[in-house]
Image (spheres, helix red, strand yellow):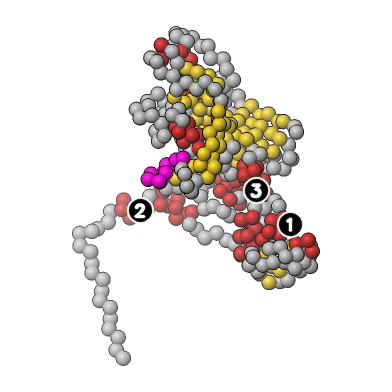
Amino acid sequence: MATRNAPAAPKSVGTKKTDAQTKPTAKARARAKAEVAIPAPPVNTPLVQSVPHEFTDVRIDAALAKLFPDHSRSRLKGWLDDGLVTLDGVAVPAKTKLIGGESLSTNFPTEEVHTTALPEDIPLEVIFEDEHLLVINKPPGLVVHPGAGNYDGTLLNALLHHAPSLAGVVRAGIVHRLDKDTSGVMMVAKTPEAQTKLVRQLQSRSASREYLALVHGDLKRPNTIENMMGRHPKERTKMAVVVFGGKTAITHYKPREAFGGPALKGKHYTLIECQLETGRTHQIRVHMATIRHPLVGDAIYGKRGDVLFHRQALHAWRLSLTHPATGERVQFVAPLAKDMQYLLKELRRERDNMPRDEEDWDDDFDDGDVQVIYVRE
C-alpha cells in the first residue's frame, strides 16, 4: 500500500531570530541545570530483624514509627511505598497488619537528594552551628523558600552553599519559616534525624518562639488571642480569622515600651513581646490587626497610608528548644535588624523630645551581639 509523504513544513516569513532571542537567559540556564536527572541514591546493607510480638495486629507503618523514632512518619511511609521495607522478603502496603515474628528488612538510603535548587553564595549571620543544628539571624528581605517569582536568591539557596550536605535533608533542613520582610532567629536541622526531632518539638509546642513587634496604638496590659485561622475567603493570598475550616491559632503578647505624646502629634505606638503557641502563616500580623493594633509598616494587614516604616516591624527575637542530639535545653537570642533599631531610636527621640545628635537608648538591642544562652533542665 502506497504511503503519502507528509507535506513539508511551511517556511516562516520575516521571523529571523536574533542572537538575543536564541540565547537562553541566565535564569533559564540555571533552571535547565537544576533539572538534570539525579542518580539513584546509595543504600545501606539491609537491616534484618524479627518483628517483636508486641506489634501483633499493629499496622506496619505504625510499627516502623515506633521502631525507628528518629525518622518521621512521612519519610518511613515513603520508603515503605518505594519497596525499601519488606516483610518476609515481600514489599507490602502501609496498612498491612503484623502477626509478630516475621522477618522485617529495612533498606534505608544513606544519602538522598531532596532539592534541585542551586547553591548560592549569600552571606548568613550564623548564631550557632554544630553537626546537628544551625541557628541563623535572618535579615529582612530574604525569602525563605524558592517559589513563584523567587526561583533563586533565597535562604534555601544560601543554606545549600553554606552546608552542601543539606541537599540530603528535606527543604534543606528548614523546619519553620519567617515572612520575607520579617527578621530574626531561625533554626535549621543539619540531618534528617535532627529535623524530625525539631519538627516534633514545634508540633508539641515544647519549642518556644518569641517575637518583638511594633504596633499601632497604646497597649496597656498583656493578653492572649486565641481563635481559628485559615485562608481569607475572598483574597487567597491573605490569612484571616475564620469560623469554619481553620486551625487553632494562639498568641500571647505583653507591652514592653510605649511611644506617644505631643512630640508624636497624638499618635501612639507600642513595642510588644509576642510568644507563639502555634505557628500559623502570618499569625502575629493577623492577630494584632484583629484587635485593631496592626503592625507598623504592614502593607497587607496594616493601616492604610502607614508610611512610618518600609516593612512590617516584626522580629523573631528569642528561640528556645531542646538540642536534637544532646537533649540539652538551649536558648538563642538575636539582635534587632539595623532598620528596626533605628526606627525605635527615632521614636524614643521624638517621645522624649531629645535632640537628634543625643544618644539615650541604651537597651539590650544596642550592642549588636548575639546572645546564646544554655539552660540546663
Q: Which residue is mark 3?
A: 196
**Mark closer to the chain start, 3 or 2:** 2
Amino acid type, label 3: Thr
Q: Nearer the viewer, residue 144 or 34?
A: 144
| Main secondary structure along the magenta-highlighted residues | loop
Task: Please tell me in which quadrant of the rendered image residue 371 appears.
Answer: top right
Report, in whole angstroms, how far the alpha carbon at label 2 lies from the one at label 1: 54 Å
Amino acid type, label 1: Leu
**5 relative to 367 in the view: left or right:** left
Task: Please tell me in which quadrant of the rendered image residue 128 appears.
Answer: top right
**Mark closer to the chain start, 2 or 1:** 2
| Residue occupying the point 67% across, 56% down | 110
Q: Secondary structure at mark 2?
A: loop
Disc assigned to residue 8: none
Disc assigned to residue 23: 2
Q: Which residues are magenta?
A: 232-241
| Residue occupying the point 71% across, 35% down | 329
Disc assigned to residue 67: 1
Quadrant of the image containing the N terminus? bottom left
